[in-house]
């Protein structure tokens, strides 16, 4: 998000920078010219989308390319179910673009404010043991490399690079187009309800296997889990969407408005947090409806927060979660934001957090006006001990030395980076930390 005075800051307010120059390219050629000009001047250049990463992955001390205007549908191949989008297209814009072709993205996360380029570059994912992150939907990209030239990766050109560039961390070039493999539009039957936490944990593996998309939230200081189970149905299925008023009350009034009040009160009077969390559990969830997939997967979020998320081998989730609960109790912390648990299929993308293994994700949140350091760093030690890999767009403390052993193709990715960006035009402080010089 760019503010008056040329200051850019991310949504979570954890990163802030005044770039030397800000540009708003509307075309691929404009991106190429910007990169070539930056190269002549010896400036580094970074592209940003919606700023929904909590790390400094998109921070641009040199030239910032804001992709807000590089949006829209480039082409659609209805026979193969593929669409090509400009890189700055926001996820919430995609459903309308796909609707005329009867297509949908196979899976989504619970927030759709991100740009498609930002979502795939950081490893954004949803939940579902048979479904990978959004980057696994990528079947082609076009990016501008450090010399200002175009590199096209698809079935016919440079196909061996797809597992690297589909989740490139912004380190290989500037994405200008992304081609996605879509599926026929579909409906989801959603069941959201509060349940006993112990029962959910004891049946966790079975629930994950039996559901198309399963996740749960746990409010610390409670013994309840807010479960979400989504079942895929054909587009022709009978729909029973939430009434407009009821959805507004649940998602806007309760989910955002009252949660904002609760977080503000909790920050002022931490002793109220257990009571507020128990109240939240009683007020949230407990609903059943059927609607188009995009209207079920995503939820509007306006309460600002900061987040750390780790991907674990799926069979490590229960023990790590138990250790996390014990940690919160032992330290006597008062945590007002829920912990979220999701799942994803293994994939072969080089820098994916689910590379080579079925994965479960544990995400921790704190209200943005609270310092998350002590909570996150202590929890991080537990998640690392269970084989965790940090989400690239969410807060963590690891560097290249620690990450190399967690990614079998790490050195292959660095070798490609050396080839495409030998002078590190697309680097910044965060990428130097996690990938090395």
Image (cartoon, rainbow, N blue to C red):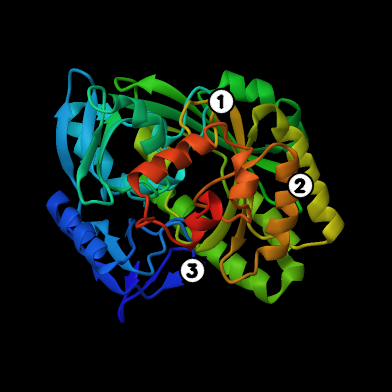
Q: Specify which label sits upstream in the sequence, 1 or 2.
A: 2
**Direction from residue 272 to residue 293 in the image, left or right:** left
Q: Residue at x 40, y 39 (%)?
A: 416
Q: In which quadrant of the rendered image does the N terminus lie?
A: bottom left
How dense is the environment of label 3, judged by Cα within 10 Å: few (below 14), some, or many (20 and up)? some
Towards the viewer: 374 or 109:
374
Q: Position of residue 187 (x, y in %)?
A: 36, 27
Measured Cα–Cα span from mark 1 to mark 3: 33 Å
In the displayed structure, 112 sits above or below 262; it is above
Q: Secondary structure at mark 3?
A: loop
Towards the viewer: 236 or 334:
334
Circle 1 sits on which residue? 356
How dense is the environment of label 1, judged by Cα within 10 Å: few (below 14), some, or many (20 and up)? some
Q: Secondary structure at mark 2?
A: helix
In the displayed structure, 319 sits above or below 122; it is above
Q: Position of residue 223 (x, y in %)?
A: 76, 44
Residue 129, can we see it?
yes
Q: Residue pushed farthest bottom?
A: 5
Q: Secondary structure at mark 1?
A: loop
Circle 2 sits on which residue? 324
Q: Residue at x 71, y 74 (%)?
A: 269
Towards the viewer: 142 or 190:
142
Q: Nearer the viewer, mark 1 or mark 3?
A: 1
Measured Cα–Cα span from mark 2 to mark 3: 26 Å
Residue 109, can we see it?
no
**Marks 1,3: beta carbons within 8 A:** no
**Direction from residue 57 to residue 425 in the image, left or right:** left
Residue 13, numbered label: 3
Towards the viewer: 418 or 243:
418
């Amino acid at each position: 998000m760019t503010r008056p005075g040329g200051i850019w800051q991310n949504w979570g307010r954890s990163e802030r920078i005044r770039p030397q120059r800000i540009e708003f390219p509307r075309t691929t050629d404009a991106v190429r010219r910007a990169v070539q000009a930056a190269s002549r001047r010896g400036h580094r250049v970074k592209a940003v989308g919606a700023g929904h990463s909590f790390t400094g992955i998109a921070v641009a001390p040199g030239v910032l390319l804001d992709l807000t205007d590089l949006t829209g549908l480039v082409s659609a191949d209805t026979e193969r179910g593929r669409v090509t989008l400009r890189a700055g297209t926001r996820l919430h814009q995609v459903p309308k673009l796909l609707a005329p072709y009867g297509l949908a993205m196979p899976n989504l996360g619970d927030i759709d404010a991100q740009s498609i380029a930002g979502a795939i570059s950081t490893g954004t994912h949803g939940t579902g043991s048979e479904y990978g992150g959004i980057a696994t939907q990528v079947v082609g990209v076009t990016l501008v490399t450090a010399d200002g030239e175009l590199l096209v990766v698809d079935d016919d050109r440079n196909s061996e690079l797809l597992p690297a560039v589909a989740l490139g961390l912004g380190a290989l070039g500037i994405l200008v187009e992304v081609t996605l493999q879509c599926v026929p539009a579909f409906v989801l039957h959603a069941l959201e309800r509060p349940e006993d936490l112990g029962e959910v944990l004891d049946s966790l593996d079975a629930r994950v296997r039996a559901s198309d998309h399963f996740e749960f939230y746990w409010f610390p200081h409670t013994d309840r889990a807010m479960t979400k189970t989504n079942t895929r149905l054909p587009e022709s299925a009978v729909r029973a969407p939430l009434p407009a008023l009821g959805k507004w009350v649940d998602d806007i009034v309760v989910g955002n408005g009252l949660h904002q009040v609760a977080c503000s009160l909790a920050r002022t009077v931490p002793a109220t947090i257990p009571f507020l969390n128990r109240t939240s559990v009683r007020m949230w969830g407990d609903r059943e409806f059927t609607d188009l997939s995009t209207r079920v997967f995503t939820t509007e979020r306006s309460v600002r927060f900061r987040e750390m998320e780790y991907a674990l081998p799926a069979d490590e989730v229960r023990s790590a979660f138990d250790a996390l609960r014990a940690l919160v109790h032992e330290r006597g912390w008062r945590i007002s934001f829920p912990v979220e648990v999701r799942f994803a299929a293994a994939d072969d993308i080089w820098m994916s957090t689910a590379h080579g293994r079925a994965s479960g994700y544990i995400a921790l949140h704190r209200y943005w006006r609270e310092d998350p350091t002590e909570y996150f760093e202590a929890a991080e030690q537990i998640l690392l001990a269970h084989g965790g890999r940090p989400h690239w767009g969410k807060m963590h403390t690891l560097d290249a030395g620690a990450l190399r052993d967690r990614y079998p193709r790490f050195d292959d990715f660095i070798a490609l980076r050396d080839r495409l960006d030998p002078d590190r035009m697309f680097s910044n402080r965060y990428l130097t930390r996690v990938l090395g010089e």
